[in-house]
Amino acid sequence: MRLAALALAVALCAPAGEYRAFWADAFHVGYKTPAEVDAMVEAVAAARGNAILIEVRHRGGAYFLKRIEPQTEDAGWQQGFDALAYTIEKAHARGIEVHAWYPVTPLWDLTRTPVDPKHAWNLHGPNVSGDEFWLTTTAAGKMSRSVDPGHPDVVRHLAEVIVDPLRHYELDGVHLDYIRYPEDDRYGYNPTSLARFRRLHNREGIPADTDAAWQEFRRRQVTDLVRQVYLRSYEIRPQAKVSAALITWGNGPGNDAEFRSKDAYSRVYQNWPAWLEEGILDIGMPMNYFAERTNGALLDRWLAFEKTKQFGRLITPGLGVYLSSIPESVSQLRRVRQTGLPGVVFYSYASTNSLQSNGAPTVPNAEFYAAVAGVFGEAVASPEMPWKSAASGRGHVMGLLSVEDGPAWLKDDVEVTIQSDTNPDAIHRRRTDSTGFFGAVDLPPDRWYVRLSRAGQELFRTVPLDLAAGQSIRFDVFLRAADFGGVVPVIEGVEVRAEGLALTMRNLLVEPAAGRAKVLAGTQVLVNGAAVDITGIGPGWIETSLPQAAVDGTWRIQVRYAGLESSVMEVAGSVR
């Protein structure tokens, strides 16, 4: 009994897992040569650190060899050196995790163009048009140097770039930085992304930046990308953690309503508390970059908010140690640990205190590592994540809808019902993202199947699959445009009358009981690209006023309904 009591006491007193991580960025030394990696691993070990996040992607180029994008054009990187493989080898030998850090939406920030003609800036940057143009823009057409997450091809490319190294390297995690819209202006108006919003919301013209639906559309694009990365990462390497650098600008919010007024939510469209609540992040890393001497109180306010937003996952606050002296950073570290949050991340490994900027070069600082080691004491492992194993009693469901022919938007925003085959009340409703991807996390073990619908009409139902705890199952669905033939609106005829247009329709799935207001909200008639007023509607017909900008000649008429578009019908029109 004494031995059992002693063992229990030791277990209770043993230090809990804690993340002690360092961001190693591409603007400084750290991992660009074998010698730099050796020095970095030793420094992190001396600091009692247990994780390094290395910026393996910079300006759309890679610091590793098994890659999709071109190699980096960083002159400090040793040509042919696989920084990722070597860092993993050296860090794992010291018990230190390695997470691949990706700045997600930034693409290129130099005045010259990339050397490699296959670089995404050359293929999809300012000199191309149409769907090949990937950059995000303002309403006035100002181009950012970042890509737009509302563009389906952007999402497809970024997701694959981020998850592919998990197939080739023994990574402990992937880290998403700049998983948002740029902050220097009001972006999101990439033409392809804007066309999606118009179709899905029955709009024409340019929405105001303050338009609530347009703001929520942009938030959803960022969240959809996080969800796809999380689920696909788990599918490839279940033990790999997915983390993100989170925006914490200005004074910390006291509640959810105040958070929605902050730049993270309302300017760059990063609704990070929702990601943790849904479970599509393992670790949130808020960038609490506040100089202690001037803004130390802001750190404390953000920490209080962050402590309430873990939702069963982890939040490990980031400290901008480059902004403060070493004693000031130690004070911030102690305050983070007092919150009980499960770790801390330092920005950055090679820029460790503000005194170095006073005429001295920014280099890794042994004094800083010794100071934080003194706070940490003994080395510890990173925290356990029981939700990533069978111990969670949960699993994940995902899938991809592909349409062999027809317009790409057929797979965009399709209604997805993930349903238990044994319990009719166990239902999870989702929608496909711009690429056709869908998924849900943390479902109980069961037999699950998926139903796909548009405009309330079922298109396809999969066979059930068994989901085990700690596992993921995938439903990939392949349809043809003809499978949507019963839901895409069809204009069968147009009559031009004195008072307006009379359209005979097929597949306008109007439910009279729903009420006229609801029907009108989901239907739009365009004449030569401009919306016209609907004066009457029924299951097989629409009546409109005359086009306000009607001219003699050909009128191109199109109907939108529930995110679907009819083909264009041309009729001879004239002003009466």
Image (cartoon, helix red, strand yellow):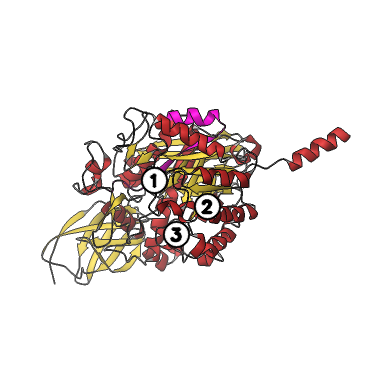
Which tag, 3 or 1, sits closer to the chain's start?
Answer: 1
How busy is the neighbourhood of tag 2: few (under 14 within 10 Å), some, or many (20 plus)? many
Q: Secondary structure at mark 2?
A: helix
Q: Is residue 483 visible?
A: no
Spatial CA distance of label 2 from label 3 is: 29 Å
Provide residue 100's location: percent of width, then percent of height: 45, 38
| Residue in front for this viewpoint, 380 or 162 | 380
Say the numbered circle drawn on residue 462.
none
* Residue where numbered disc 1 is placed: 103
Say the numbered circle drawn on residue 264.
3
Question: Which amino acid type is shown beneath numbered disc 2?
Answer: Ile
Whether tag 2 and tag 3 are in contact, CB under 8 A, the answer is: no
Whether tag 2 and tag 1 are in contact, CB under 8 A, the answer is: no
Which residues fall within the magenta stretch? 85-109
Provide residue 53's location: percent of width, then percent of height: 47, 41
98 is within the stretch colored magenta: yes
* Residue where numbered disc 2 is placed: 326
Which one is in front in this view, the residue at disc 2 or the one at disc 3?
2
| Residue in front for this viewpoint, 228 or 410 | 228
Whether tag 3 and tag 1 are in contact, CB under 8 A, the answer is: no
